[in-house]
Image (tube, coloured by chain):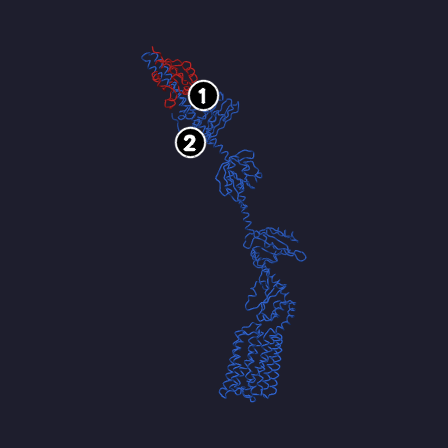
């Protein structure tokens, strides 16, 4: 309401009430004068308080509505006029003030009428216009029992029935509308928040009281004139007091502003911010929210996250800014919405406190966050004082120690809880050495946890200082590394095992990268020893440099294949020793991962040089045996051809010649026959000699001793023999016979000896037969020079035997052949001799 | 009187040479020379130019086929002898240039004569 309008309204009111009082005071109203004066005074109270309210809260319509009630109220004073028309008009308009009154009540305290309440105002309008109109039209005495009152000037009929019915209907309708308003106000009160109740309570109370009194007055007027009059007084007094209630509610902002000074004092005295603000705003339900930039969320005083204050339906929020930043929100009752100025003033007064509280809330939020992290962290965290006593700790400490009560941990020495007794003294010593600086340190120790399980903890400590730089606390953080330690030990064990295996196996182990470069520790002991390489010389060099040139390409391909993940089958290559020698190695290349997960190629090989040599020897020996056999056959065939065969051919010719001379020259025939007999005898001898050379029959029938006796009997040199009498397995006897025979042949052919010795013995301990043949010849025999000894070696080795020769030049030759005799061979030994 | 054909006996076995000489002379051959090896045979044959040569296949220094080869095209007829069977020498005999082959046990003057032209 503008000031001009307010002034006009006040002026109009002054005129109206001046007229009203003039009418009341100049008229003889007898006993009704007091009542009428009271009515007029009530109107004036409404007018004056309305004007005050409108002047102070021009933004709120309540003042204007009160002023309207006061102005319209004054029309009722016309009832005091002696003039019938004015009186009747006054009566007809007397209740019209209840329209703005109803509007005022239902609009309070915002000044805006809720849409759903409009029907109440319209109903009141209908009743207070039609009701009195009906009365003045049909009842000659609108005010009952008023002896001084003029009759109705607008009477249209003198029907007694209508005259009685009209006031009654008006009273009933008024009572109905009043009841409806009554119910409406009760419901609104019950639905109101505490601050709203505090504002509307007195107004509703006076209204209900006035309405009740008026309705009761209408009802009891039929029975008791005086009681009705008193009830009217009550109603009027209630109505007259109502504007004060309105004014109190309307002006509470002004009163509250005075409380802002108290707010500042209260905050200065350390009163909690929320309580101080609640008091200042008169809203005990006030809540505060603080903006946490770190969390980008609204939090309460304790740092707990809140829903967005704007999104709270039943409550309103006012935001507090500091330094251009939104720092807090006041979540208040919606009744304070129309007092934005007050809220803002309160917020501004408390903005510093808000900022402080906000920072505290944020710190609390951070603290809560850290607390959550610390308590949920699996690490052991404890704070000890400079004496080593535990002063604070997290949940993990409680769990690990098994001491679930904080009091059982607090104050205990750190090492009593976390260090096993055998490590405790060392820990105490270390702690005391660190005093007083307690520099950051790391160490590991074991302790037995609540479950009796030994745990390894890696500790890190750091000092906390006071403002003077003195250490006041030490933070100790521990991580359970038991499992890690166990795995480390396990891995180390596996690694050691693999290393021991790799370093002790006779096989060669070389590990390279995909370019065939040998990695650190990539060559085992066997390799280094066999090839005379110091391991440090190999690291970083190419394995291919250690392979003979002809085999390098194949080795390169094998390593490349394995580097591509394809295991390579065994192959043979010549690997080079440091001094340039070669060794034949059968090796494979396999893709592997080393202990750090890097792809490597494992070369695993075995030295087959000796095996190859032996194989070569066996091959050569077999070739020689075959050659010797072929030569023997050729010799036999030649011997037969040159010997017996020629003699028999000649014999055939001689016999044919003798036959042809039998008749012509008997003497010549006889001569030819004599020559033929001699030829035949020689042929037989040669055949016998041949047969003996193939296999001496005596050996089979009589054994080694007699066979060798016969052999040496035909020898041109003297041979002394020492042979066991018992029979040996046939294969052994044959081997011993031929070894001896060939040895003696060699003696005769090459040694230039005059005598020889043959010694054959069965060595039970060795399970072998030992043949020794010695001579007194020139010595210097060399098996590699093909002096017949090669054949002997082959023969002995065929039977898995060994052959040794000692032949110093000028000191004779001694051969020693050892032929193993297997148990099963004895089964084949002849039990007795046969001829 | 018919002239006796001349023959040279080549064999490294003296007993065979002696028996062969007696048998062939008895059968009407005139044994004009003997040789005990290949070189000796080439020398004797070149010198004596016999009507026929009795040549042992197996000689110490070279075999009978080699001797035939060395004798060349103007060689006298050669009859190979051996204590082995002819089949032991497979086709060598037919391509050697010899007139034929006689087993030593089957040797006789008539057998040699059958092979001469």
Closer-to-camera residue (A228/A441)? A228
Q: In the rendered view, would you say A723 is above or below A679?
A: below
Task: Please tell me how crowded label 1 is: few (under 14), some (14-19), or many (20+) other residues with Cα within 10 Å.
Answer: few
In the image shown, does A3 or A354 lie closer to the viewer?
A3
Q: Quadrant of the N terminus of chain A?
A: bottom right
Q: Could you tell me how far apart the alpha carbons at marks 1 and 2 are, in whole angstroms? A: 31 Å
Query: Quick one: SS at disc 2?
Result: helix
Front residue of B2/A16: it is A16
**Image coords of residue A225 (percent x, y):** 54, 86
Give above or below for A142 relative to B82.
Answer: below
Q: How many discs appear?
A: 2
Whole-percent x, y for residue A793 in the image: 47, 28
| Residue under numbered circle 1 | A715
The vertical placement of A553 against A366, above or below, is above
Label 1 marks a residue whose chain is: A
Q: Is residue A238 visible?
A: no
Q: Which chain is blue?
A: A
Disc 2 target residue: A826
> For this view, does A715 lie left or right of residue A129?
left
Element on which disc 1 rests: loop
**Residue drawn where x is 66% and y is 57% of the image:** A466
Residue A120 in the image: above or below residue A608: below
Give percent across and percent down for residue A94: 56, 83
Report the residue that reaches farthest toward the top: B1
Image mark for residue A296:
none
Q: Chain of mark 2?
A: A
**Residue A542 found in image quarter:** top right
Q: Which chain is red?
A: B
- Residue extending farthest to the left is A663
């Amino acid at each position: 309401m503008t000031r001009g309008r307010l002034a006009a309204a006040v002026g109009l009111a002054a005129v109206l009430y001046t007229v009203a009082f003039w009418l009341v005071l100049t008229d003889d109203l007898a006993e009704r004068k007091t009542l009428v004066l009271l009515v007029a005074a009530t109107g004036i109270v409404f007018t004056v308080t309305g004007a005050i309210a409108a002047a102070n809260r021009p933004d709120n319509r309540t003042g204007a509505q009160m002023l309207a009630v006061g102005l319209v109220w004054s029309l009722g004073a016309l009832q005091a006029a002696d003039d019938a028309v004015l009186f009747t008009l006054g009566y007809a308009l007397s209740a019209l003030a209840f329209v703005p009154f109803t509007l005022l009540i239902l609009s309070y305290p915002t000044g805006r009428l809720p849409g759903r309440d409009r029907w109440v105002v319209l109903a009141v309008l209908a009743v207070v216009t039609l009701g009195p109109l009906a009365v003045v039209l049909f009842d000659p005495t609108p005010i009952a029992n008023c002896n001084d009152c003029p009759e109705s000037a607008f009477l249209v009929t003198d029907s007694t029935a209508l005259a009685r019915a009209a006031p009654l209907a008006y009273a009933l309708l008024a009572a109905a509308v009043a009841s409806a308003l009554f119910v409406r106000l009760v419901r609104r009160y019950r639905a109101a928040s505490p601050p709203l109740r505090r504002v509307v309570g007195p107004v509703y109370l006076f209204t209900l009281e006035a309405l009740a009194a008026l309705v009761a007055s209408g009802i009891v007027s039929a029975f008791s004139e005086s009681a009705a009059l008193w009830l009217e007084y009550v109603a009027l007094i209630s109505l007259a007091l109502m504007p004060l209630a309105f004014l109190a509610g309307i002006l509470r902002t002004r009163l509250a502003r005075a409380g802002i000074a108290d707010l500042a004092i209260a905050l200065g005295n350390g009163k909690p911010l929320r309580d101080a603000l609640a008091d200042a705003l008169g809203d005990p339900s006030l809540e505060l929210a603080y903006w946490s930039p770190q969390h980008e969320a609204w939090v309460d005083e304790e740092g707990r996250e809140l829903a967005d204050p704007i999104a709270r339906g039943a409550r309103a929020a006012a935001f507090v800014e500091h330094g251009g930043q939104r720092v807090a929100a006041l979540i208040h009752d919606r009744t304070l919405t129309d007092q934005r100025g007050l809220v803002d003033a309160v917020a501004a007064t408390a903005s510093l406190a808000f900022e402080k509280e906000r920072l505290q809330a944020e710190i609390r939020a951070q603290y809560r966050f850290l607390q959550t992290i610390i308590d949920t962290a699996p690490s052991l965290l404890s704070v000890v004082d400079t004496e080593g006593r535990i002063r604070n700790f997290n949940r993990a400490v409680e769990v690990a120690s098994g001491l679930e009560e904080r009091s059982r941990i607090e104050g205990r020495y750190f090492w009593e809880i976390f260090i096993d007794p055998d490590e405790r003294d060392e820990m105490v010593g270390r702690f005391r050495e660190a005093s007083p600086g307690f520099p950051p340190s790391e160490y590991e120790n074991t302790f037995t946890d609540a479950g009796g399980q030994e745990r390894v903890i890696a500790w890190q400590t750091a000092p906390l200082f006071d403002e003077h730089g003195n250490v006041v606390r030490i933070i100790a953080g521990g991580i359970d590394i038991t499992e890690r330690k166990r795995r480390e030990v396990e891995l180390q064990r596996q690694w050691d095992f693999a290393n021991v295996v790799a370093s002790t196996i006779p096989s060669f182990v070389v590990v390279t990268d995909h370019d065939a470069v040998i990695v650190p520790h990539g060559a085992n002991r066997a390799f280094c020893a066999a090839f005379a390489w110091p391991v440090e010389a190999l690291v970083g060099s190419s394995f291919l440099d250690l392979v003979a040139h002809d085999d390098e390409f194949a080795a390169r391909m094998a390593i490349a294949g394995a580097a591509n993940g394809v295991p390579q089958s065994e192959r043979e290559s010549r690997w080079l020793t440091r001094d340039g020698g070669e060794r034949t190695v059968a090796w494979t290349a396999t893709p592997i991962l080393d202990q750090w997960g890097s792809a490597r190629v494992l070369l695993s090989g075995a030295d087959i040089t000796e095996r190859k040599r032996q194989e070569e020897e066996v091959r050569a020996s077999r070739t020689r045996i075959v050659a010797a056999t072929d030569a023997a056959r050729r010799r036999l065939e030649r011997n037969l051809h040159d010997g017996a065969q020629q003699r028999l051919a000649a014999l055939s010719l001689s016999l044919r010649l003798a036959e042809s001379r039998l008749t012509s020259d008997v003497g010549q025939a006889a001569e030819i026959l004599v020559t033929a007999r001699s030829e035949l005898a020689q042929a037989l001898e040669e055949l016998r000699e041949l047969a003996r050379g193939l296999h001496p029959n005596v050996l089979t029938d009589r054994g080694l001793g007699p066979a060798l006796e016969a052999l040496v009997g035909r020898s041109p040199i003297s041979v002394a023999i020492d042979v066991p009498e018992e029979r040996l397995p046939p294969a052994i006897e044959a081997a011993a016979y031929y070894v001896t025979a060939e040895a003696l042949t060699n003696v005769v052919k090459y040694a230039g000896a005059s005598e020889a010795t043959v010694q054959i013995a069965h060595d039970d301990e060795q399970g072998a037969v030992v043949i020794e043949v010695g001579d007194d010849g020139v010595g210097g025999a060399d098996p590699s020079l093909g002096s017949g000894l090669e054949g002997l070696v082959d023969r002995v080795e065929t039977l898995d035997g060994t052959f040794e020769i000692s032949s110093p030049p000028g000191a004779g030759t001694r051969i020693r052949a050892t032929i193993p005799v297997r148990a099963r061979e004895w089964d084949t030994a002849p039990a007795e001799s046969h001829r | 009187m018919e002239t006796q054909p001349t023959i040279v006996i080549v064999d490294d076995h003296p007993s065979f040479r002696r028996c062969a000489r007696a048998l062939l002379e008895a059968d009407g051959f005139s044994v004009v020379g003997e040789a005990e090896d290949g070189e000796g045979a080439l020398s004797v044959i070149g010198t004596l130019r016999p009507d026929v040569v009795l040549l042992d296949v197996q000689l110490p220094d070279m075999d009978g086929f080699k001797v035939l080869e060395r004798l060349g095209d103007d060689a006298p007829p050669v009859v190979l002898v051996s204590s082995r069977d002819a089949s032991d020498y497979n086709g060598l005999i037919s391509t050697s240039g010899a007139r034929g082959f006689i087993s030593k046990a089957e040797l006789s003057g008539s057998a040699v004569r059958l092979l001469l032209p």
